[in-house]
Image: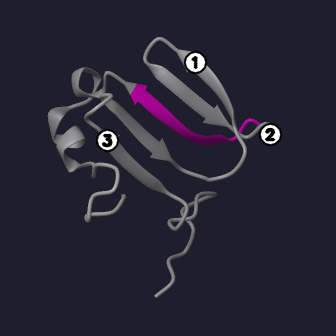
C-alpha cells in the first residue's frame, strides 16, 4: 500500500536516526540538495531554491531531546530501520 504524501513531505523520503557515538539526532523530511544553516544546537537544511525545510540535525541530542524520543529513534544501520 502506497502512502499519500503528508503535505509536501513524502513518507518514503522521511527518515530519522540517533547516532550515540556522536550524540546526534538526524531528521530528514525531504531528500535532495540542501543548504545548511548552523545554530548553537545543530543544523537546519533548506532547499536552496525556495527555502523549504528539508531536515535538521540536533547536536548533543541526549541532552536536548526528551529521553523517550532519543530511545525511540533507531541507530544507524539498525535492523529497526528509520522512522
Which residue is farthest top? 40
Is residue 64 magenta-colored?
A: no
Region of the chain picked out in magenta, as a range: 49-58
Q: Position of residue 50 (x, y in %)?
A: 80, 39
Tell me how far mark 1 sits from mark 3, CA to CA. Answer: 19 Å
Could you classify mark 3 by the number of other residues whose Cα lies within 10 Å: few (under 14), some (14-19), or many (20 or more)? many
Numbered circle sitting on residue 71: none
Q: What residue would you read off at disc 2? A: 50
Q: Position of residue 58 (x, y in %)?
A: 41, 28
Q: What residue would you read off at disc 3? A: 18
Among the 4 quarters of the image, the one containing residue 38? top right
**Relative to 7, is 17 above or below?**
above
Element class at badge 3: strand
Numbered circle sitting on residue 38: 1
Q: Position of residue 15 (x, y in %)?
A: 45, 55
Tell me how far mark 2 sits from mark 3, CA to CA. Answer: 28 Å
Q: Which secondary structure type mostly characterizes the magenta part of the structure?
A: strand
Tell me if 60 is positioned left or right of 52 in this view.
left
Is residue 51 magenta-colored?
A: yes
Q: Disc 1 or 2, which lies upstream in sequence?
A: 1
Residue at 64 percent across and 28 percent down: it is 36
Badge 1 vs badge 2, beta-carbon distance below 8 Å: no
Amino acid at each position: 500500500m502506497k502512502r499519500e504524501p503528508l503535505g509536501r513531505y513524502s513518507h518514503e523520503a522521511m527518515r530519522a536516526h540517533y547516532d550515540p557515538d556522536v550524540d546526534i539526532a538526524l531528521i530528514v523530511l525531504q531528500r535532495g540538495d540542501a543548504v545548511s544553516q548552523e545554530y548553537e544546537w545543530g543544523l537546519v537544511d533548506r532547499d536552496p531554491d525556495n527555502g523549504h525545510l528539508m531536515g535538521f540535525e540536533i547536536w548533543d541530542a541526549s541532552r536536548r531531546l526528551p529521553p523517550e524520543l532519543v530511545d525511540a529513534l533507531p541507530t544507524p544501520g539498525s535492523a529497526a530501520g528509520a522512522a
